[in-house]
Amino acid sequence: MKQLFVLCLTLGVVPGFCENRSIPVAPIALYTHFDQEPPVGVVEALHDELESIMAPMGMTFEWRSLNGVKGNELSVELAVLTFKGRCDIAGLVPHNAGNPGALGWTHVSDGNILPFSDVDCDRIRTFVQKELLGVRSPDREESFGRALGRVVAHELYHIFANTARHGSCGVGKSAYTVQELLSDDFQFEERESLALRTSKAHTVLENAAHTATPPVP
Ligand SMILES: [Zn+2]
């Protein structure tokens, strides 16, 4: 089975009956920079997949372009995502590239996990391109965007669960197969999901949601 190491990849998701689902939490601000502006279809699938994976933890996101930052934006929790290379599906060829290297990674300094992740679109595309050509042409951008969303979810797991640990299965595992990146459904296992729901970041988001509620007159 073909595998690729993804340093610091994503977040786990728990089934829809998760008991914590109803707890309101403030949104996380995601600041993005793309080397090249991606197609709308890829971006929409990326957003949808991340929301889908994180929904069981009650985590939601506000996507903001790093280029538009004025310095007066407020957010309770944030992460900065840099998408390297070309995040589109032009020029796919039916070849396996072997192991192209890490698909995504999160920055660490002195043992501290920083809220900065990189996602390598070129490597992800190269990794999945042969199988992506087997996807119906109108669905390829969505499949590719979904794969990007899974890599992003993995990296955000490291940031918001504040851990370098990996799971043995699901979005929190250290290496993905092509099939896992392109499958219809891929989520976090219970342990990684629990790590997110019980994280300090989650508590901060819950408290922010409460304090944002207008006081009763
Ligand atoms: Zn990882």
Image (cartoon, helix red, strand yellow):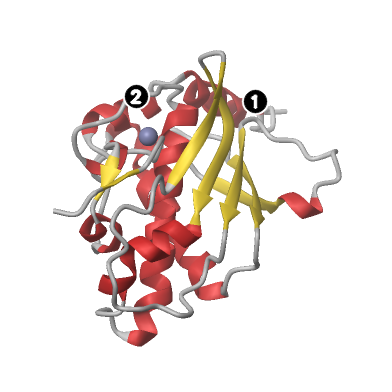
Q: Relative to residue 45, is residue 187 drawn left or right?
A: left
Question: Relative to 166, is 127 above or below?
Answer: below
Disc 2 marks which residue? Answer: 195
Question: Relative to 45, is 194 above or below?
Answer: above
Label 1 secondary element: helix
Q: Nearer the viewer, mark 1 or mark 2?
A: 2
Disc 1 marks which residue? Answer: 211
Q: Residue at x 43, y 33 (%)?
A: 23
Q: Relative to residue 80, is residue 147 drawn left or right?
A: left
Ligand 1's image quarter is top left
Give the alpha-carbon distance from disc 1 to disc 2, as whole Å. Answer: 24 Å
Rendering quarter of residue 185: bottom left
Question: Relative to 9, is 3 above or below?
Answer: below
Q: Relative to residue 11, is residue 186 drawn left or right?
A: left
Q: Residues within 10 Å of mark 2 (few under 14, many from 20)?
A: many
In x, y percent, where is residue 162?
46, 22
In x, y percent, where is residue 177?
23, 53
In x, y percent, where is residue 64?
68, 52
Rendering quarter of residue 178: bottom left
The amino acid pointed to by label 1 is: Thr
Label disc, if present, on residue 105 of the rendered structure = none
The amino acid pointed to by label 2 is: Ala
Label 2 secondary element: helix
Q: Residue furthest top?
A: 110
Q: Which one is in front, 92 or 59? A: 92
Q: Residue furthest bottom?
A: 137
Q: Quadrant of the C terminus?
A: top right
The earlier-in-sequence mark between 1 and 2 is 2
Q: Residue at x 53, y 65 (%)?
A: 87
Rendering quarter of residue 181: bottom left
